[in-house]
């Protein structure tokens, strides 16, 4: 249960002002006072019939159907509806046989009851920018308050966006859970989101998604590249048709502020809740002698998935004013400063001793070897999204790796198997073998380019490693004029990390001139080998010590976390087959780091789920559904368990491995996704002895 917030001494407040989140400073938190950094708040009411908080009026059926049309891209309501449809489906398996409408979905109540209701939720939505007032990019904040919110039993759940998604990025994960529980949901895009600057036409996105001229937009722009107009024009003349993207080109390291941004979303929630539920006198005037919704009487759970989950953990670590009571997350992108070596021993699998790895470390490694590993016999199965047209390019990558001394084998088959073995030796679990291809095809190059630019705080003008973003011709791969129609709805259709909505990665160093990176010709090999020169340049940012590498490595050091939650209870759930954020690099070392730092005062639980991977939205791919189960089910359970812990004192489950059963060709049921045990057997428990983390098979 909640404990009263203790008053801070002046000395403690002074310490907090220098060490804690910049959003708090040396002051007591006052939910009645509008934070200095909070911009103008826009308020919208949704009746739960024509429009609503969770489904934008589409309901369960509409979210599962065809994309809503946007007849007027200058209408924020239409953009919002498509954005919610896109982001909800980007997180979940939306097929009925995969669990939508039975295990989860708008029609499934908080207690698990399946209804025929469309699941629309009425309420109020508050949107604002967190303005840094120092020339930095705007961070979007949004708070949804359902009509079922009970001010006598207040609760807040955070919904920090996963990936680089826009403000509705967590609508289908912690957002849905919170709204169904009657909690306010505090969202933030954490400085990423759909900020796309068309440098040719000089247009940008506003917070509501509408495109506008960059000059006219001014401070209301979600992102305008921090370059002068003369620089923009000169760059466009020399390198036509490029676009700048917020996460990559803000010349900030937004990940360094993910915790702060999540805490700010919580602060905004307290502020708007007290405004909405303020008492009034007989003449209708507000009476607010003291806050009625305060940290000491409100349940606050930090939650989300992937990047949003990492942000939740960082926010809990940085929280020095008791704003957050507990954490419930899945598959967190969290980069741990372990300090001491860690051994992971999983059943019969060889020990892993590499410890926590930085995201850009393992992604640049994957970017080198995954295209070649795609040809390994072990990696083949019927659902591989690897068109036959790309197979010759993958062969070229294998040959180029060998020619550069990065593979020792001499035959193509042996090279592919060696590349896969290198990935496994680096720390990927054997369970990820079938997913290496899809993750390189849909995620790896995009993440490497975006985060390399972000950590090093590079400008769009720098074209780090000879790479840029542009729309490309479908036949030649050459950069073409920006697609104005695609940009007009990119707030609703994009994911914030190209390739997205028609924007692609371009290799400006390709033989013969700039080309689509995927089809470009590497100068050092004169082959179409998926731009091995660019991949090696990006890898060198981790392994070398030139100026660019030092900039990137400094940015990585800024985002390392300690694993110290100051005694806050937390449930971390991760799929063992996660190929994007592998368990050995993130959740396993975070759990070990927490046990080392907090010892007996710690209250963190780690649940590892077999046959679960990072992208539930990939499960509709043929054969994926037969092999993997939705991890989203376990996010809901983690939130349920944390809510019960904070409200009625129920014990959290011990750390353990949950063994699931893939559904094969049958519709999924609860049998396939069993709950964890409050009394796991010795063969299920996860144990740490201070040096070795023992994971059951």
Image (cartoon, grey):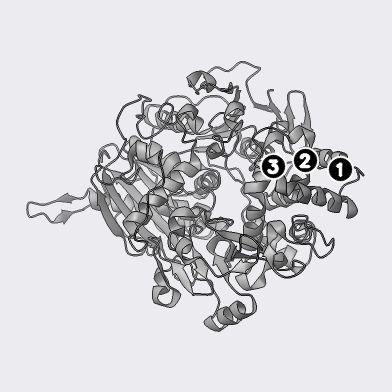
- Mark 3 to mark 1 CA distance (whole Å): 17 Å
- Mark 1 to mark 2 CA distance (whole Å): 9 Å
- Residue furthest left in the image: 282
Q: Nearer the viewer, residue 463 or 16?
A: 463
Q: Nearer the viewer, residue 282 or 349?
A: 349
Q: Is residue 638 among what the camera can see?
A: yes
Where residue 606 sits, quadrant-wise, is top right
- Mark 3 to mark 2 CA distance (whole Å): 9 Å
| Residue 375 numbered tag | 2
**Circle 3 is placed at which residue position?**
437
Is 59 located above or below residue 246 in the figure? above
Residue 442: percent from left, percent from top: 62, 48
Residue 22: percent from left, percent from top: 48, 60
Mark 3 / mark 2, whichever is N-terminal: 2
Residue 357: percent from left, percent from top: 70, 46
Q: Residue at x 39, y 69 (%)?
A: 220
Q: Residue at x 27, y 45 (%)?
A: 123
Residue 32: percent from left, percent from top: 29, 55
SS under mark 2: loop
How crowded pointer 3 is (Cα within 10 Å; few <14, some 14-19, many 20+) is rated as: many
Mark 1 / mark 2, whichever is N-terminal: 2
Q: Residue at x 49, y 26 (%)?
A: 652
SS under mark 3: helix
Circle 3/circle 1 CB separation < 8 Å: no
Q: Nearer the viewer, residue 12 or 164?
A: 164
Circle 1/circle 2 CB separation < 8 Å: yes
**Circle 1 is placed at which residue position?**
412
On-image quarter of the N terminus: top left
SS under mark 1: helix
Q: Is residue 12 among what the camera can see?
A: no
How crowded pointer 1 is (Cα within 10 Å; few <14, some 14-19, many 20+) is rated as: some
């Amino acid at each position: 249960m909640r404990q009263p917030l203790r008053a801070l001494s002046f000395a403690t407040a002074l310490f907090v002002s220098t060490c804690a989140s910049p959003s708090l400073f040396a002051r007591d938190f006052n939910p009645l006072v509008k934070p200095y950094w909070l911009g103008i708040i826009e308020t919208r009411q949704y009746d739960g019939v024509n429009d609503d908080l969770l489904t934008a009026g589409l309901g369960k059926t509409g979210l599962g159907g065809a994309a809503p049309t946007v007849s007027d891209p200058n209408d924020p309501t239409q953009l919002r509806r498509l954005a919610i449809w896109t982001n909800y489906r980007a997180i979940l398996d939306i097929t009925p046989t995969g669990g939508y409408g039975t295990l989860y979905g708008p029609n499934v109540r908080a207690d698990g009851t399946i209804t025929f209701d469309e699941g629309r939720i009425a309420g109020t939505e508050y949107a604002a920018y967190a303005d840094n007032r120092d020339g930095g990019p705007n961070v979007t904040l949004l708070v949804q308050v359902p009509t079922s919110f009970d001010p006598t039993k207040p609760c807040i759940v955070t919904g920090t966006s996963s990936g680089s998604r826009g403000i509705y990025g967590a609508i289908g994960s912690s957002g849905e859970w919170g709204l169904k529980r009657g909690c306010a949901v505090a969202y933030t895009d954490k400085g990423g989101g759909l900020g796309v600057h068309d440098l040719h036409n000089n247009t940008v996105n506003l917070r509501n998604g509408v495109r506008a001229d960059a000059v006219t937009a001014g401070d209301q722009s979600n992102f305008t590249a921090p370059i002068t107009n003369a620089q923009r024009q000169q760059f466009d003349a020399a390198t036509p048709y490029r676009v700048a993207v917020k996460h990559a080109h803000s010349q900030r390291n937004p990940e360094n502020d993910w915790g702060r941004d999540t805490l700010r979303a919580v602060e905004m929630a307290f502020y708007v809740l007290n405004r909405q539920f303020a008492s009034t006198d007989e003449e209708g005037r507000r009476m607010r002698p003291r806050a009625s919704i305060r940290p000491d009487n409100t349940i606050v759970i930090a939650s989300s998935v992937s990047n949003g989950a990492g942000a939740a953990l960082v926010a809990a670590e940085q929280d020095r004013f008791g704003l957050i009571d507990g954490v419930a997350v899945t598959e967190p992108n969290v980069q741990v400063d372990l300090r001491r070596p860690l051994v992971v021993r999983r059943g019969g699998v060889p020990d892993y001793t590499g410890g926590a790895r930085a995201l850009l470390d393992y992604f640049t490694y994957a970017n080198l070897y995954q295209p070649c590993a795609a040809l390994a016999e072990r990696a083949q199965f019927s659902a591989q999204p690897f068109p036959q047209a790309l197979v010759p390019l993958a062969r070229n990558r294998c040959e180029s790796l060998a020619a550069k001394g990065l593979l020792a084998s001499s035959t193509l088959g042996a090279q592919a198997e060696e590349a896969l073995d290198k990935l496994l030796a680096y720390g990927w679990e054997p369970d990820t073998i079938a997913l290496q291809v899809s993750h390189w095809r849909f995620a790896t190059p995009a993440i490497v380019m975006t985060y390399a630019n972000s950590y090093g705080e590079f400008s769009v003008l720098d074209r780090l490693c000879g790479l840029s973003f542009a729309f490309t011709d479908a036949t030649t791969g050459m950069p073409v004029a920006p697609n104005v129609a695609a940009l007009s709805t990119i707030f609703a259709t994009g994911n914030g990390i190209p390739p997205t909505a028609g924007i692609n990665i371009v290799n400006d160093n390709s033989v013969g001139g700039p080309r689509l990176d995927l089809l470009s010709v590497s100068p050092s090999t004169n082959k179409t080998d998926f731009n091995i020169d660019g991949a090696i340049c990006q890898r060198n940012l981790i392994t070398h010590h030139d100026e660019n590498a030092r900039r990137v490595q400094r940015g990585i050091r800024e985002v390392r976390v300690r694993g110290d939650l100051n005694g806050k209870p937390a449930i971390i759930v991760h799929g063992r087959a996660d190929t994007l954020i592998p368990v050995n690099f993130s959740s396993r070392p975070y759990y070990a780091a927490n046990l080392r730092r907090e010892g007996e005062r710690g209250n963190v639980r780690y649940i590892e789920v077999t046959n679960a991977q990072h992208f539930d939205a990939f499960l509709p791919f043929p054969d994926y559904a037969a092999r993997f189960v939705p991890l989203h089910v376990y996010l809901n359970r983690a939130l349920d368990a944390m809510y019960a812990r904070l409200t009625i004192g129920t014990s959290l489950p011990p750390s353990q491995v949950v063994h699931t059963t893939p559904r094969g060709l049958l519709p999924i049921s609860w049998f396939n996704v069993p709950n964890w045990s409050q009394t796991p057997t010795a063969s299920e428990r996860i144990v740490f002895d201070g040096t070795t983390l023992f994971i059951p098979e």
